[in-house]
Amino acid sequence: MSAPLTLQLPLPAGHDPIGSLALITAGRGDPTARQQPGALALALPLPEGDVELHLQRTDSGLSAWIWGPGAEALPPALPALVGAEDWPPPRLELPPALAARLAPHRGLVMTRLPVLWPQLAHTILGQLVTYVEAWKAWGGLVRRFGRPAPGPAGLGLPPTPEQLAALPVDHLVALGVPDRIARTLRGAARQGNRIARAGAAPPAEAAALLLSIPGVGPWTTQSVLQGALGDADAVPTGDYHLPNTVAWALGGEPRGDDARMLALLEPHRPHRGRLLRWMVAAGVHAPRWGPRSAPREGDPDRD
């Protein structure tokens, strides 16, 4: 293995790119990422070649090591990738108890990935109702049909759009992916040029491109805008939990729907998606009543 390309990026105190990027991974079981205290390894399939990026927070900023044939192409995208210009965090008018709970997480910034396909594929699988099912399917997809990343962390990369488009639906169903979602994933994989254009576009144009893909609706589109394209105002509608979370946190109401969520978030435009990120990181949720629901194949509103 050749020596990595090394870089240093100054960042202000309190800026948390590691925690920010960790929010868009599938956690400890994600084969494309690995997090340790103050550090993150991430595999990325750039057009110029695969890379494995290691980030380490230091007192003065961020150290980066990049392995792989695409290493020379990543540095120009690195500031956006770590949200270097997304600082300082905005001051939002919040209920005092919520503001105090979110305070430790205000260093989370909006990040923009240099390639959109892995996050889109990951998010389409997130249309499964339970996150456990979705992340299990993502791990199976990468391990069975992907390829090793070019670095020392033992990470993997998902199949390319061309490889996934050629996979029979039955291969995806065998991973626990319902037929409807498997067909959406394969259909999206056939739209490689459209996905690449969305990855380089401003939010409104990117949203229109993604929504034109059959099976990709508001939930998937807004989740990708927020997680992969750094849109601080993106709000996923059709989510099972978010309306209740927002209703409870901002209105003291234990249950809500999309309309109520959007009404409560409206005063915080253009930082509605950022506020949702802070809430998720802080573990804010509405009271949970009754038994845990049984897993279903997919939520028809989460598309």
Image: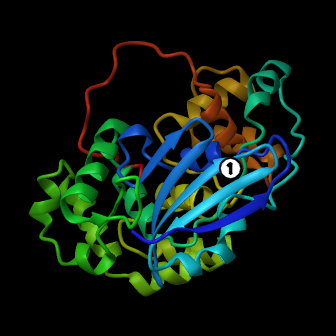
Where residue 59 sits in the image (x, y, percent)? 79, 43
Q: Nearer the viewer, residue 141 or 303?
A: 141
**Mark 1 packing: few (<14 Cα in 10 Å), some, or many (20+)?**
many
**Residue 303 visible somewhere in the drawing:** no
Where residue 275 sits in the image (x, y, percent)? 72, 41
Residue 225 as seen in the image, left or right of residue 178: right
Q: Residue at x 29, y 46 (%)?
A: 298
Total numbered labels placed on residues in the image: 1
Q: Residue at x 81, y 62 (%)?
A: 85
Where residue 4 sits in the image (x, y, percent)? 53, 68
Determine whether the residue tagged by mark 1 lies in a helix, strand or loop. helix
Q: Nearer the viewer, residue 120 or 212?
A: 120
**Residue 181 visible somewhere in the drawing:** yes
Where, by quadrant of the figure, is residue 45 drawn?
A: bottom left
Residue placed under numbered mark 1 in the picture = 17
Residue 187 as seen in the image, left or right of residue 16: left
Q: Amino acid at mark 1?
A: Pro
Q: Residue at x 28, y 81 (%)?
A: 162
Residue 240 as seen in the image, left or right of residue 178: right
The image shows residue 181, relative to residue 129, as above or below, that is below
The image shows residue 237, relative to residue 141, as above or below, that is above
